[in-house]
Amino acid sequence: MTQITFANATVVDGTGADTVNADVLVLGDRIVDITAPGSVHQGRVIACEGLLLTPGFIDIHSHSDLTLLLDPRASSAIHQGVTLEVIGNCGHGCAPMRDIALARIAMYGPVPRDGFFSWTTMAGYFEKLEEARPAINVVALVPNGQLRLSHIGLEQRVASSDELKSMCRDLEVSLDAGAYGFSSGLEYVQERACPAEEIDALCSIVSKRGGLYATHVRDRDQHAVAAIDEAIATSRRTGVRLQISHITPRGGMVDTEAALSRVDKALAEGLDVGFDMHTRLFGFTHLKNLLPMWVLEGAPGDIHRRLLDLQVLERIQQHSNLISAVGDWAKIVLVDSLAFEAFNGQTFDVIAAQRKVSPFEAAMDVLRSDVEHLQRPMVLLKTYSESVLRTTYEHPHCMPGSDATTLAPDGVLADEKFHGAYTWASWFLRRMVRETKALTLPDAIYRMTSLPARRLGLEDRGRIARGCHADIVVLDWNRYSDRGTVDNPSQLAQGVEHVMVNGVFTLTNGRATGERAGRIVRY
């Protein structure tokens, strides 16, 4: 076993402490010592003079459940210095599931056709992911969307007593397999009918095991603060540890300050509450979220026929959803439609004017034309300002996250787009630290490393300390930056020199090594 020495690095240890110059020694998959520069020269020496050395970044809110199976290299993440992702967020994920056709509704990424899915349980999913050998570590949550699709299907109603018992059993089995907790996406159509009592029953199971409940709350627009109150009330009733996903409401600064004050009050009360926020100036979701669940039933041909029915269209137009809640088609941008490729990047008011139809009709045209690939067309929701995000990030309990999938600019995912995938960490450090100085470098690194690690209960990750796992990033601070843009998001970040995951180099001298040493981190 060869010792590796990162020599004369500027170390940001992940705790929020000031930087120090040090040598960091790695043996096997662990950090074995941090010493004065030049005091040890054994084994392989990596010269790090003038470079920052930090713990690997932890993405507390990812949607890479499927893309890590399709392309386990996780290039978009690794090139930013990400070494661990939490998947299963917002009630979306790849397990547990019973009906594969329905399960596709609650997945992100290009969902393969029949034959790909060889598992139904969380344990089976973990086995499949381990076979894929991801380049990053993975922590999984159990998605409420899949629990409801498995036991209630497309019906938008409260679960029966027997159905809820079955959901609770599936949750327990998934936690036994190593999931870290449970997530909900109560704003999504497959979960909108889920009452607080149902969430309480499931969270009570998670609470008894000390797991985490991460929630995309029921409303992130005009009733966002009330929805956050609902989530906090769940924590109060059940004792579950609460993580509020992408907390910033779409309503602006007043709602954001009110939301943050709710967290402060809950913390003062003694509740265990944390939160995260993505690092882009817009929301990003499937265009299909315009549709009620019953429209999505059956084969693509069935969906297409419904989307031609005038009575169905009238009902869809009255359907409340997270896209229509924006209230202005000029703030909704089409992304990644195959059939309407010429209109990608344009707002729906502009698309409608060019097609001489209403914006709603233009959206239905896209869904009809892309009905064979309903996972593909996405939309940007122009709902945030940088000042609002900055206020969120400055709160001492805020953690940044991608709210995106891992991707790669080559291979099977080369044509996929997910804003934030290539830029979330690099934008955050470039903009919030180097340019605006909203946060100090040690504080920003803390929010991306030991703070989320502690939130997950991972005592041996997220820090540069003796005995911790050797998840290490070495970067050139002056060059470290995002390169992806709104129009061209799929560009690798720059400035990362070396990435080590569990003691194995995934990136050296800015180039991928081909090694993949990520692990499924089970609870």
Image (cartoon, grey):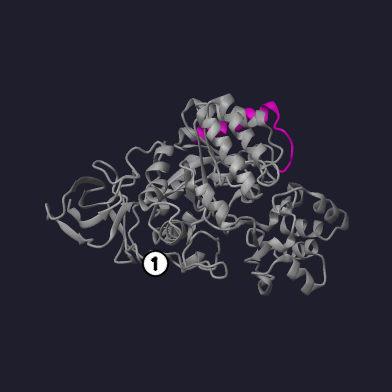
Does residue 14 appear anywhere in the picture? yes
What residue appears at the point 64 percent right and 33 percent down from the top-left corner?
A: 230
Left or right, 217 with reference to 329: left
Tell how many labels: 1
Q: Please tell me whether residue 164 is drawn above or below residue 460 in the rendered image.
A: above
What residue appears at the point 57 percent right and 70 percent down from the top-left corner?
A: 487
Looking at this view, is 128 or 371 the one in front? 371
Does residue 216 appear anywhere in the picture? no
Looking at this view, is 161 or 235 the one in front? 235
Looking at this view, is 4 or 100 the one in front? 4
Left or right, 22 with reference to 125: left
The stretch in magenta equals 154-174
Considering every residue shown, the one lying at the far right of the view is: 311
Percent position (x, y) of residue 126?
Answer: 45, 44
Give the overall secondary structure of the magenta segment: helix
Percent position (x, y) of residue 347?
Answer: 70, 66
Left or right, 80 with reference to 470: right
Q: Secondary structure at mark 1?
A: loop
Q: Which residue is mark 1?
A: 494
Q: Is residue 356 magenta?
A: no
Percent position (x, y) of residue 55?
Answer: 33, 50
Q: Please tell me whether residue 426 is drawn above or below residue 223 in the rendered image.
A: below
Residue 437 position by quadrant = bottom left
User: What amino acid is at disc 1?
Assistant: Gln
Percent position (x, y) of residue 438?
Answer: 45, 53
